[in-house]
Structure formats: structure tokens, C-alpha cells
Image: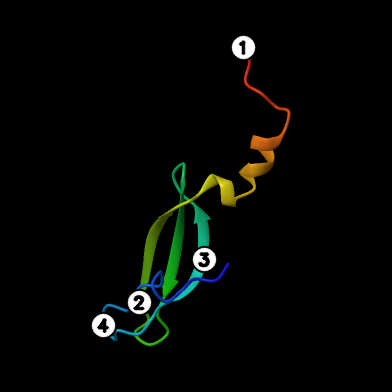
Amino acid sequence: MTLSTIERPMGPVCKHRMGLARIFPGPRGFDERTFECSTCERTEVVRFAVDPMQTDAVGWLAGKLKPPN
């Protein structure tokens, strides 16, 4: 997944774009993305809302598995 420059935060000290270092599952419906700045060596964790239709959840939604009646 590529992030546009709009989604990448600026380093708070140097004002350069931070690079995406890691993505972890966050609270339900969110990913926690860790950004690192190679210039000022700062890190920042940002939560992004996840669209379930753009993840592997689509397979479950389209499957025959249904909740009990």
C-alpha cells in the first residue's frame, strides 16, 4: 500500500515528510501506523480508519458463514 504525501505526517522539528515504518491492527476499525523521520529521528503513531471493504474481511462478508438466527 502506498501512502500519498497528504497521508504522511511532517516531522515536527525538520518539516520533512516522515516515512511509514510499521502498520499494526489497532482498536476495531482502525490501524495504527508508525511513521519515522530519518532527518530528525522522531516517531509518531497515527490511527487510520480502515474500510472493511478494502481488507480481507470482504471474503468473510461474501462467504456463506452467517450469524445464528
The amino acid marked with disc number 3 is Arg
Real-space CA distance between mark 1 and mark 4, rounded to the nearest whole angstrom: 56 Å
Q: CA distance from mark 2 to mark 4?
A: 8 Å
Q: Secondary structure at mark 3?
A: strand
Q: How far across and how far down the image is residue 16, in percent?
A: 35, 85
Instruction: Say if 32 sits above or below 27 in the image.
Output: below
Tag 4 residue: 13
Q: Going 42% across and 76% down the picture, which residue do you hit?
A: 5
Between 11 and 49, the residue placed more toward the observer is 49
Between label 2 and label 1, give the one nearer the viewer. 1
- Disc on the earlier residue, 4 or 3: 4
Residue 3: x and y, percent? 49, 71
Q: Secondary structure at mark 2?
A: loop
Judging by the rendered image, the residue that carries numbered circle 3 is 22
Residue 69, label in figure: 1
Tell me the element at label 1.
loop
> Which disc is residue 42 wearing?
2
Q: Is residue 69 above or below residue 59?
A: above
Marks 3 and 2, the one that precedes in the sequence: 3
Find the residue positioned furthest to the left: 13
The numbered mark, 2 or 1, whose residue comes first in the sequence reads 2
